Image: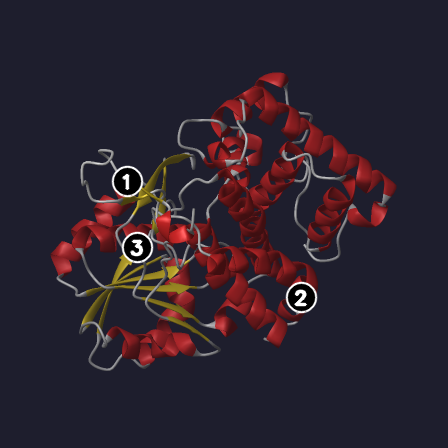
Amino acid sequence: MSLDQEVTTSAGRDGARPEPARPPITFISPSRYVQGPGEIARLAEYVREYGEAALVITSEGTWSREGCKILAASGSTQMRLHHFSGESTAADIDSGEAAWREVGSEVVVGLGGGKVIDTAKAIAHRVMAPLIIVPTLASTDAPCSSLSVVYDDDGEVVEYLFLKRNPDLVLVDSAVVASAPAKFLAAGMADALSTRFESAAAAASGTINCAGGRPSAAALALGAMTWDVVRTHGLSALRAVARGVVTPAVELVIEVNTLHSGLGFESGGYAAAHAVHNGLLVVPEISGGMHGERVNFGVLVQLMLERRPESELDEFITVTRRLGLPVTLEHLGASTALSEDDIERIAVRTCAPGEGVHQMPFPVTPDMVAAAVQGADEYARDLIERQPALAAPSLR
């Protein structure tokens, strides 16, 4: 059968309209992406393309550092602030929506890190307003997506909000991002490189992506590129950021962390690594670090589930440890060996209904996850014992 004949009908040969045998290829993205040093000072100029007043969702600390640059060039554009509490909860989203309706702004701006961004996206969705995202860190792939993650007050994931559209503009000031401690860029690289492994697994399983269709070749290529860039340019970028310098490697890694990873996971797919991240949150000892750090360990667990050869496990551990990323439960904050009960709770949460682990190309059970978590931890500890240089990376 030729490709153009690959159709089915819902009512046999009775003349019913042919329907596609599978969902169409679907790719979604922000309407515009802008990245470069000093761009945050042009925020008001960009806002004016959508309206004369913006509600800026941000933390007090972020505004104290960046607000003067924004206000100095704001002109007639009104910048009304709504301070973010620190957690992307349903209450935060409700509060931001109430603030929007009270002050009567036209544009929503999310200024800050991943949870500020998730909150701003949800607020803009509710009030149907244009949305500008201004990340001040490159520590997650949240800025470009149409997904908001909602947490409870204890920091555990309670809901994924799949929104109707992506941001209208993602505005990245690379000088601002590079001024943050290097560990944030490293965490973003972990979140980014997971896209290579998760999108490939999700595509192999035949599940639909976040956009409701099949992944495009472009999305999978962007996902693959994240790993290539991180292992080739990641250490150079971290060294430059540690010196306060924006080099081509820094610009490339920021772009990969923010744009390529965001497009790759949303239009490609996600799988076990982020599900393991969510599972790890149930253990208080290891729930206080950064998102990307837990995801990095989640990738190693996914590689164990996939029964990857030792050469691939060794490469992943070596590359990510040189970036200062965790590959053991101890690195994540566990002061002692986790109990069997803790491991079981992680595994059960990882396999909760709707989690990405069910988008692996084979069925995954809590017992399999528990074995993979323990196996990943033991394998990484053994490799570090054999290669002591990996125990304490110079960049952390």
Q: Position of residue 61 (x, y in %)?
A: 41, 59
Q: Secondary structure at mark 1?
A: helix
Disc with the residue nearer the chain's start (1 vs 3): 1
Q: Position of residue 66 (x, y in %)?
A: 40, 70
Amino acid at the residue labelled 3: Ala
Q: Secondary structure at mark 2?
A: helix
Q: Which residue is mark 3?
A: 120
Disc with the residue nearer the chain's start (1 vs 2): 1
Q: Residue furthest top?
A: 341
Q: Secondary structure at mark 3?
A: helix
Q: Which residue is mark 2?
A: 233
Amino acid at the residue labelled 1: Ala
Q: Residues within 10 Å of mark 2 (few under 14, many from 20)?
A: some
Q: Which residue is mark 1?
A: 90
**Is residue 227 left or right of 390 when viewed as pictured?**
left
Amino acid at the residue labelled 2: His
The answer to which of 23 and 15 lies nearer the viewer is 15
Q: Quadrant of the C terminus?
A: bottom right
